[in-house]
Image (spheres, rainbow, N blue to C red):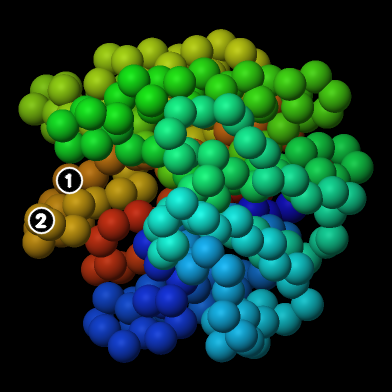
Amino acid sequence: MKFISWNIDSINAAITHSSPRGEMTWAVLNEIAQSQPEVLAIQETKLKATGLTPKQEKALQEIFPNYQIYTSSSTARSGYSGTMFLTKNKPENVSYPQLGVPGEMDQEGRVITLEYPNFYLATVYTPNSGSNLDRLPDRQAWDDAFRAYVSELDQSKPVIFSGDLNVAHEEIDLKHPSSNHHSAGFTDEERQKFTELLAAGFTDTMRQEHPDQTGLYTWWAQRSKTSKINNSGWRIDYYLVSNRISDLVEKTGVIDTGARQDHAPIELEIKL
């Protein structure tokens, strides 16, 4: 089975593709459609609180015919955050969990879970700690709550989850670790929470396949014109699986988005 996950940074920008960046995003989305993954997980949809507009839904159905579409939008702030699944095979159940986290995080459409006969498939858009780390305490509470959630799922059947986890786990996971030690996404606190997530029984599939590969990134800052050219990036997007199915992983990778900066899609092929 092939799964793809992508922080798209606005579904509408991709569908309208009225800017050079939007055109690149739309082109990548069409390439993903042509590869026909069993499931595409999307984060940061930035949809309105009411979800997809008829125009947006029609555009997606044209390039992903016969896919089921499930969305979770932010009701706290419309056009912010949000997640989505497009799946060939209808799941047994779809849930939009409330984790009991601080502030408005539970209202920001950050998690969707699909249940299939032999596994759970979830996607997550982890909150950013903020440029001044003002949201770091809430972010730590989120990490604890999400870890507890997927651990509970794991008690009944294996779990696969993907998304923008907003953390580079080790120094190998970003180009400039020393200068970013106290930056959001590479604080000691965030990295420790990721370590605890792995210790709870989950495998980072990309590192399992490429344990020592440097320069393996999924995000390049838009504010730096040369970040992609110089491959000055971060690996903050992941596919994690329950340890007991990690040996079923056949392939992982980052999908090339050319000159487009920000997040790149990641893929997972697993024999289930």
Q: Earlier in the sequence, mark 1 or mark 2?
A: 2
Q: Quadrant of residue 210?
A: top left
**Residue at 25% across / 82% down in the picture?**
20
Give the amino acid type for the residue marked by disc 1 in the picture: Ser
Q: Quadrant of residue 232?
A: top left
The reply to whether residue 180 is in sight is yes
The reply to whether residue 212 is in sight is no
Neighbourhood count class around disc 1 (C-alpha, 10 Å): few under 14, some 14–19, many 20 upward: some
Please give the residue where the numbered disc 2 appears in the rendered image: 224
Asked if 217 appears above or below 257 in the picture, the reply is above
Secondary structure found at label 1: loop
Please give the residue where the numbered disc 1 appears in the rendered image: 232
Give the x, y percent position of residue 65. 72, 81
Asked if 90 appears above or below 185 in the picture, the reply is below
Q: Quadrant of residue 188?
A: top left
Q: Which mark is residue 74?
A: none
**Residue at 11% across / 23% down in the picture?**
178
Give the x, y percent position of residue 255. 44, 58
